[in-house]
Image: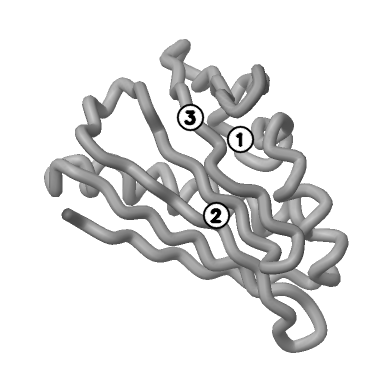
């Protein structure tokens, strides 16, 4: 199993950032390569800019921990396992966002890494 961890610092207060992260149906407002996102119960479907889709199960939205946990159930990457967490903490007058992704097969990490990198660049702006 591979683990990818990305950390970004944004100038906005944790409660402001949390309001955006906790709105799991609107993740497409935060990440540029997502054209759309919808939520049906605990299942989120994200449409990618290339027309592909990700089907994700929202596992937890914990306001006390300011953490969202989700798992990709179906994607173009043919993952056999995926679970991810976005966690917030106050940091230097703003918020630190830590995004941890565990996935299999290991080869999928080389495709997932640039996607997460791009998403983090986008969120640097959209969460501020």
Q: x, y (%) of residue 88? A: 66, 68
Q: In this view, does 6 lie to the left or right of 109?
A: right
Q: Is residue 11 left or right of residue 87?
A: right
Q: Residues within 10 Å of mark 2 (few under 14, many from 20)?
A: many
Which residue position is annotated with label 2? 120
Could you say whether the residue bearing mark 3 is in a helix, strand or loop? strand
Name the residue nearer the viewer: 14 or 65.
65
Q: In this view, does 85 lie to the left or right of 94?
A: left
Query: Which is nearer the N-term, disc 3 or disc 2?
Result: 3
Q: x, y (%) of residue 116? A: 44, 49
Q: How far apart are marks 3 and 2 (CA)?
A: 19 Å
- Please say if 48 is above or below 63: above
Query: Which is nearer the N-term, disc 2 or disc 1?
Result: 1
Which residue position is annotated with label 3? 56
**In the orientation shown, which residue stands out farthest toward the top?**
51
Residue drawn at x 35%, y 22% as measured from the top left:
74
Which residue position is annotated with label 1? 32
Foreground mark, 3 or 2, reads: 3
Q: Could you tell me which quadrant the C terminus lies in?
A: bottom right
Q: x, y (%) of residue 117? A: 44, 53
Could you say whether the residue bearing mark 2 is in a helix, strand or loop? helix
């Amino acid at each position: 199993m591979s683990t990818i961890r990305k950390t970004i610092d944004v100038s906005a207060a944790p409660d402001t950032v949390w309001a955006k992260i906790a709105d799991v149906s609107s993740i497409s407002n935060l990440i540029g390569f997502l054209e759309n996102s919808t939520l049906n119960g605990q299942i989120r479907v994200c449409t990618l800019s290339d027309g592909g889709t990700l089907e994700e199960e929202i596992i937890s939205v914990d306001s006390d921990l300011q953490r969202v946990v989700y798992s990709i159930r179906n994607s173009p990457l043919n993952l056999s396992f995926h679970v991810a967490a976005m966690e917030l903490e106050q940091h230097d007058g703003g918020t630190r966002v830590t995004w941890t992704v565990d996935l299999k097969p290991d080869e999928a990490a080389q495709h997932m890494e640039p996607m997460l990198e791009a998403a983090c660049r986008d969120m640097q702006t959209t969460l501020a």
